[in-house]
Every structure is written in C-alpha cells, then in structure tokens.
Amino acid sequence: MSLRVAVLMGGPSEEREISLSTGSAVVKACKSNGFETVEFSFHHDIESLRDALQEVDVVFNALHGGIGENGEIQAWMDQNEIKYTGSGSKASALCMDKAKSKEIARRLGMRTPDWELLASSRDKPCLALPFVVKPNDQGSTVGLSVVREISEIEPAIHEAFNHGHTALTETYIHGRELTVTILGNKGYPIVEIKPSHELYDYECKYTPGLSHYVCPAEIPDELAENIQKDTETIFRELDCSVYGRADYLLDENGQYYFLEVNTLPGMTATSLVPKSVNAAGMSFEKLIKSIIDLSI
C-alpha cells in the first residue's frame, strides 16, 4: 500500500501565492514518487480539514509565513495527532522571531548584524545609518526597507509595522548573499544569490530571471565548511528538524554574518533548496521523498 500524503498549501498569510506554487510542485513530486497524494488549499478554516488530515500518513506542510510557519499550525497538528513534515511548533516559533534567533546565534559566538527590536511604530531606532528595517515575524523580505537617510526612517518603520507586530532594525552589511540548505542535520552546497536589485527582495526571489545563482558558491573551501558547520550548529540549537535554510551575508573582508533560519523554505521553480541539493546530485523528487521519510 502506497504512502498517503496530504499537501497543505495556501493559508491566510501574505505569502499565500508562493505557498500555492510550492504546493503545486510538491504535489507533482509526490505523485512521481508513487505516493497516494491529495492536496488541500485553505484560507482561514483549518478546522474544517481536521478529519481529512487525520486520515493520511503524513501532511507535507507547504505553507509559508503566518500561522503556517510561526508554530500555530504545527501545534494544532500536534494536538490532533497529525504527522507533518519539518520542524515542530517550538522551533518554528523561535525561527519566525528573528530577534530571538539572532540572540541565540550571538550566544553561540556567531556574527550577526547589530539589531534593535521595535515594539511600536513610535519607537526611535538608535542604530547608525545605514540600516535595514523589516518585520520581526515575516518572511520573503515582505515589508523590508534599507534606510540611508534620516527622512527614510519613519516611512520604513511604518512599512514594517504594516506587515508585522514588531519590527527589527539591523545594521546594513554590504556583501554577498549566501544561503545554506540543511537536510537531515547535514549542510548542503552553499548557494550565492546575485540579485538584479540592491537586495534579494520579494520580486527578485520569485520572478524568473531577476536573480542569478551560483552553486556551489565560489568561496574558499575552508570558509564554506565553517559556514556549513555553523548552520548545522544553529539548526540544532534552535531545535529545528528535517530540513531548513539559513541565510548569511559575506562582507568584503571575508567575514560572514548570520541573518535567519527559514523552517519552511520555498519549493518553487526559483527556490534555493532544490538548487542546493541538486548540486549534490539530488533530484527534486528525491528531495521531497527525503523530507517525507525524515518526518515519519
């Protein structure tokens, strides 16, 4: 009897359309693997899916952002004894809170840009310009701005609070954008992202042709190994499991800075995790099967 897999996608977050793209790709891969596959797209009423989700062997969580990534859906599935892919509720909530994950990274001795957490849009940041302003609890660079002038501070803060409950200001680091995939607690080849915009923003992430990717990244072997080891360490310390992705900046002096861990990275045509494992000889179908195997 083939494994019964439900692919959960959509949801109420601002990343809904990306989730639907990820879900569609995962459904296709599950069917290619011979799994008995059903897809569930929802907006708000997850309770209406409870009985159906309890009937499958595992739920592939293809949600992005919001309740799908902040631990709420994971806690709900735990309560209803539903198996699912990826990290649990505690790790998901911790990684969605960028300030808390940065605190843990710094405690481990990892470099991370200086930051401040703003609880209100009336709070005044104290960091020297330039700095980045972004929601503390969003993904896909939603609501992110680079502030270079004093006149840009207030609009940037309001933009961040339009998309999140708290905001993070972070010292701007000019450098190369690197990302590391973790699968089964092992770091995979590093991807360097070369966006056509100043930053790897939402448009560059999801519009084919707006970013160029180099994998493995053209950096010294020792540096790559150090970044991978740090990624494996922070992944464990944040209590993450199965798979994820960690993002870094590499400055002109060869110093790398931890930014965040993404517990539900995208699986779209432009996504980074498939590029990374492909460089290690793993197909997209094998990646999806590995995620499911590690989750059950």
Image (cartoon, rainbow, N blue to C red):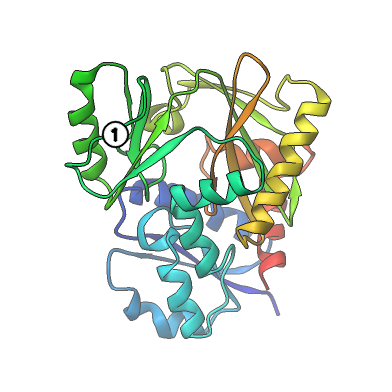
Q: Nearer the viewer, residue 46 or 263?
A: 263
Residue 273 spot, x, y in % from top left: 62, 42
Residue located 18% across and 30% down the image: 154
User: Is residue 249 positioned above or below 186 on the image?
Assistant: above
Q: Is residue 152 left or right of residue 225?
A: left
Q: Is residue 113 left or right of residue 44?
A: right
Q: Is residue 14 left or right of residue 263?
A: left
**How many tags in the picture?**
1
Residue located 49% across and 22% down the image: 173
User: Is residue 211 positioned above or below 139 on the image?
Assistant: above
Quick one: SS at disc 1? Answer: loop
Tell me if residue 23 can be seen.
no
Q: Which of 120 and 42 is in front in this view?
A: 120
Residue located 74% across and 39% down the image: 228
* Image quadrant in which the N terminus is located: bottom right
Kindly identify which residue carries mark 1.
125
Q: Which of 240 and 237 is in front in this view?
A: 237
Residue 45 spot, x, y in % from top left: 28, 73
* Image quadrant in which the C terminus is located: bottom right
Tell me if residue 149 can be seen.
yes
User: Could you say which quadrant of the image residue 283 lies in?
Assistant: top right
User: Is residue 34 positioned above or below 128 on the image?
Assistant: below
Residue 130 spot, x, y in % from top left: 37, 20
Residue 257 spot, x, y in % from top left: 59, 32
Q: Which amino acid does label 1 sit on?
A: Pro
Residue closest to the far front: 126
Q: Nearer the viewer, residue 295 or 187?
A: 187
Residue closest to the far top: 252
